Amino acid sequence: MAKPPEPIEEVMPQAAWVVEAVVKEVLATGPTPAKPANAQPGATSVGYATASQTVKLTITNVLKGEKAAELVVEKPVGSYSLKAGNKGPFLIDSTKTILGRYGPDSWNLERVKSAVK
Amino acid sequence: MPIRFNDTKLGSLYTNFEAQKRTNPNLKLGQEQVLQLVALVGDGNRGWSASKIATELAKPGVSRDAQIALVKGGMTANEKKDLAAILDQGTVPLDPSAKQFLEAVLDRSSPQPPPPPPPATSGLAVTGDQKNGLTGTTKAGATIEAINISTAPGGRLHMDDTSVIGKADANGQFNMAKLTGDQAMREGDLIRMRARYADGSTSDWLTVKATGIAAKDTSNATVALFRIGMTDAGGGKVAVSNINASRQVSEPGAQLEFTTKRTGEKARVTITETGGFPDGFKLNGKPGDSFAVAASDGVNNTAFTETVGNVTVPGGTASTTDLIPDPALHKDELDGAGKPRFSKTNFTGPLFIDGAKPEDVQQGQIGDCYFPAAMAAIAKANPDAINNLVKDNGDGTYTVTFKQKDWASGRFKDVAIKVDGDLYVRSYGGALYGHSSNSSDPKKMELWFPLVEKAYAQWKGSYNEIGNGGHSSNVFEAVLGKDGQDMYVSTGNLDRVFDTIKKAVDAKQPVAAGTYGESEEARYTNSGVYADHAYSILGYEQVGSEKFVIMRNPWGESEPAGNGANDGIFKLKLSELGKLYQNLMYTN
């Protein structure tokens, strides 16, 4: 569902960690979500959902939260998928779930750094 | 005498307990409630969130002593004062164990008499006027933090989101301390400030009314209309609240006047010290009623003749002042009972500023990317088509004339849709759905795009009907009255794709492109292009044998790296287009 990312000001208060990280490994993938009803071929913003994933992140910089070298986190069912090598700023809540509609592509690093301040 | 809290979140929670006590006189705060309170103070020095502290406090096996140590370790001097005030002056009784817990947090080994009154000086004093900035005294070496709480309601600032504006010298003197940018002091503005000492503790808050800056205070109180929540309270009453209580509706002490458009009845309220409404504030009214809001800071607009906008009570049938019934919200914006989670505000800005431009278009929180992508493409290729699409009727309504194909005759006929300027708004401001890039202010935002989107939703039935995917080519048809076309894109037909784009751009016809959806999302992560999404095509370039397409994300931001300002506009190699996009949408 190609809605814009949520306003970072709404998401940041839920973030226990804000880190720059690289996906080291996808450890597990959840069941494939059902297709949206009446999805038309070639249409956009149909709302296809991707499976949840459990991924291991290698942390390169901690902007907020306790220091860690690696974190195993959950990518919820949503609008994007992760694979090894994907990187970017990750906002992670206290249950170790990645926040933001597009995970590391939700907001650029500059904006994330500004919101952490 | 209500407690004056330094920590606004703590104050908000305690005020909530006080409100509960009014309906439940037997209410006593137990350990659970006290842990909620101390979780809000334990965050101060440590950089943890309140939820993080709450999680740590509630972990199995954490002893009472460990809880106390956790809270004390993160508590600032001001927060300590707040807890002491709850203990000594609070109106909601504490049960014995909760009271002992708080006493332990405050290092009181046994019940204490009420503390002596605070010292005559707060640790910070301001002298003179503010012609050259803020001048005053505090402890030597302290930094001076301040926020302009007269301008803050227009932004996203909390009342304690201060900026450091100066530092006291060895004698404790500071001078010429100034706020800048949107926070710059104007005559009559309220400046909330405090000193932060070398040990991290702070002085009490001090609020100063700026003087000496100009001959006259000409800046009225700013009102964050979008934070005014109205709900049906039953019995002909409407409850009015600040729907984002951590931020201000207006400056403390300002008066707001509400005029019920249906009856003409007027009511005034004074904004509280925390920038919101007094608890339990209600107006006479019912669902669907619309209220005109006027404000005065006591100097400007004292007759309340100039209004800042309208707020409508969600639900019910539209009042007589709602010029046109509005399309219903998308289902994602309804609560469990099917009622709207967002209210509406009447937008009165200009229909066009310098005509229609692709940069005007900003997709909102709705899955209709194909619509803004199409409108931005039309604005680029044929802005006159948009200038002719929507007309201001001069009475608060606008007519948008779409084209609908009569399949029997093959001809397009006009479908005129009339809308007003009411748009759903977010809790922190600005339109929820499609909006314009120039401003989020209801009085300034350029209206053509949000109104055309609203009219499209009205025509199709609701925002839900347009917010679950579609084709930009259908929007081209609806605006231009020309048959839309879709062409599948692959790495094998790129010459034909480029030729189609070139012909359309040269003929001033709109083009858009859509990315893949199902099962293809992983290819997009980190690419700067998003899955299941539509993009406007604004142009093309050819450098030698290399071909490029100029594209725009309808979010007005988020694009592949290396494309300059983050404005959503980017240049993509044709080969990349072939990999990332599944179809091209254009008109015959």
Image (cartoon, coloured by chain):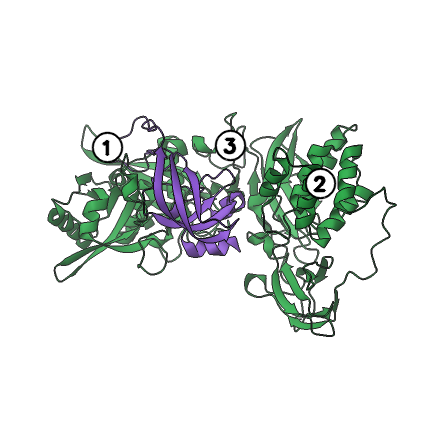
Chain colours: A purple, B green
Q: Nearer the viewer, mark 2 or mark 3?
A: 2
Give how far across and how far down residue B68 sits, in percent. Answer: 70, 42
In the structure shown, which secondary structural element does the residue marked by tag 3 occupy? loop
Q: Quadrant of residue B103?
A: top right
| Picture coordinates of residue B181, whole percent (x, y) | 54, 64
The picture quadrant where one finds residue B469 is top left
Q: Are marks 1 and 3 in contact (CB under 8 Å)?
A: no
CA gap, disc 2 and disc 1: 62 Å
Indicate the secondary structure of the residue bearing disc 1.
Answer: loop
Q: Is residue A36 left or right of residue B335?
A: left
Q: Which mark is residue B65?
A: 2
Q: Is residue B284 left or right of residue B104?
A: left
Q: Is residue B30 visible?
A: yes
| Residue bearing the label numbered 1 | A41
Question: Quick one: quadrant of the C terminus of chain B?
Answer: top left
Q: Quadrant of the N terminus of chain B?
A: top right
**What residue appears at the point 24 percent right and 48 percent down from the top-left corner?**
B510
Please name the amino acid that badge 2 sits on.
Answer: Asp
Task: Specify whether disc 1 shares its chain with disc 3.
Answer: no
- Per the model, the C-alpha gap separating discs 1 and 3 is 31 Å
User: Is the residue marked by circle 3 packed among few (<14), some (14-19), or many (20+) residues within 10 Å?
Assistant: some
Q: State whether residue B279 appears in this view.
A: no
The local secondary structure at tag 2 comes to helix
Mark nearer the N terminus (2 vs 3): 2
Disc ID at residue B340: 3
Q: Are marks 2 and 3 on the same chain?
A: yes
| Dot 2 alpha-carbon crowd within 10 angstroms: few under 14, some 14 to 19, many 20 or more | few
Q: Nearer the viewer, residue B476 or B437?
A: B437
- Mark in the foreground, 2 or 1: 2
